[in-house]
Amino acid sequence: MPSPSIRNAITELEKNEQFRQMAAGCYLSAIRNIADYAIETEDETTESFRQALRALADRLEPGSPTAFFESRATLRALLRNYRDKASIHFNQLRDEFGRTAGALERLIETMSLGDGDHEERLRESLAALREISVQVNDTTIGPALAATADAIQQSIEQFREQQNLTVSQFLGEINLLHKRIDALETAVSVDDLTRVFDREETELRVREVTSPVSLLLLKAVGLRRAEVQFSPAVAQQLTAAFVKRLRHNLLPEAIVGCWSDEEFLVILPAAQREAMTAAKWLTEQLTGSYACVHAGKTVRPMIQVSVCIVECNSKEGAGSALERVRQFFQLRP
């Protein structure tokens, strides 16, 4: 009969195996849930994304530890590619809606500018026609002219009612388009936070660099203070506003990563001189107050930004560059 120590070891192994199976099941369930609840974009893109996720889950079904470990990069790549394609699709829709709304607004403006002159001229002509009908002595022509004037007046009123209805419909369409534009902006960016990589992904992007780049290391002091002084919602608004302003002051091909709550890393495809200019510009443009809403009122928390530059090239190696990044941010590997 096994000794108590052996029985305890067997029990512990069984518990570990149960936990491993439960964790694996949750991971597979999460992948399938991502596939089932993926945001609908273009039919082909969404269906391809779902099939790839389901195929990944099927491959992992046997439960190989190696396969689970290697699947992290595959899952990350699938999510990143779908995010990029969805962003392009939503941006195209947003631009299309914006153009349509602009065209409708210009049409309404044209109608508003032109109709007043036409209506005034018609009313003047009707007044002249009624005056003539009164002056004409003929008992047949006079009433006929008056009846014609009344008919024209009635047509003008009907046209005016139809025009008001059309303008009202156009305004409704414009409001609907603007709401869709706002919704698409939210879906694309989620306050621009979804376009910022986490630390793990940022390190991976640095390791994947094949040509010399400059790493801009930003400390944004004030984000934590905003949460303590106001609320987590204000801190989130402040972070989103900071990231948005940061992106607007960078090249489109720059990659932005969030290293920690108040620390960000930018992979900038630029030489050291250009990076130094960018660092100075970012310090000036990002430091200052940001408008946020708290309890129905506007508050303006401050952010103080400092920037350091780390060169990353093939000779030095990504590992050495990342070590210098950790030293600047005072974080352990």
Image (spheres, rainbow, N blue to C red):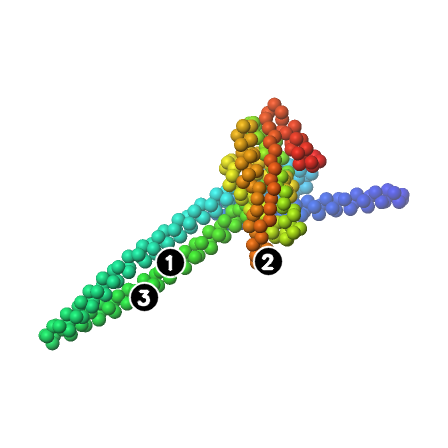
Which label's residue is closer to the chain start, 2 or 1? Answer: 1
Measuring 63% from the left and 49% from the top, which residue is drawn there? Answer: 226
Query: Along the horizontal axis of the image, is 66 left or right of 12?
Result: left
Measuring 20% from the left and 68% from the top, which residue is drawn there? Answer: 127
Label 2 environment density (alpha carbons within 10 Å; few <14, some 14–19, many ≥20): few
Q: Quadrant of residue 110?
A: bottom left
Measuring 60% from the left and 49% from the top, which residue is drawn there? Answer: 301
Residue placed most toward the observer, 197 or 296: 296
Q: Is residue 230 above or below residue 320?
A: below
Residue placed most toward the observer, 320 or 328: 328
- Residue type of the residue flagged with mark 3: Glu
Residue position marked by numbered label 1 in the rendering: 170
Task: Measure the alpha-carbon separation of dots 3 and 2.
Answer: 44 Å
Residue 191 percent across, percent down from the top left: 55, 48
Task: Measure the alpha-carbon separation of dots 2 and 1.
Answer: 35 Å
Q: Would residue 35 be seen by someone viewing this image from the given angle?
A: no
Query: Along the horizontal axis of the image, is 147 left or right of 265?
Result: left
Q: Is residue 106 above or below residue 214?
A: below
Residue position marked by numbered label 2 in the rendering: 295
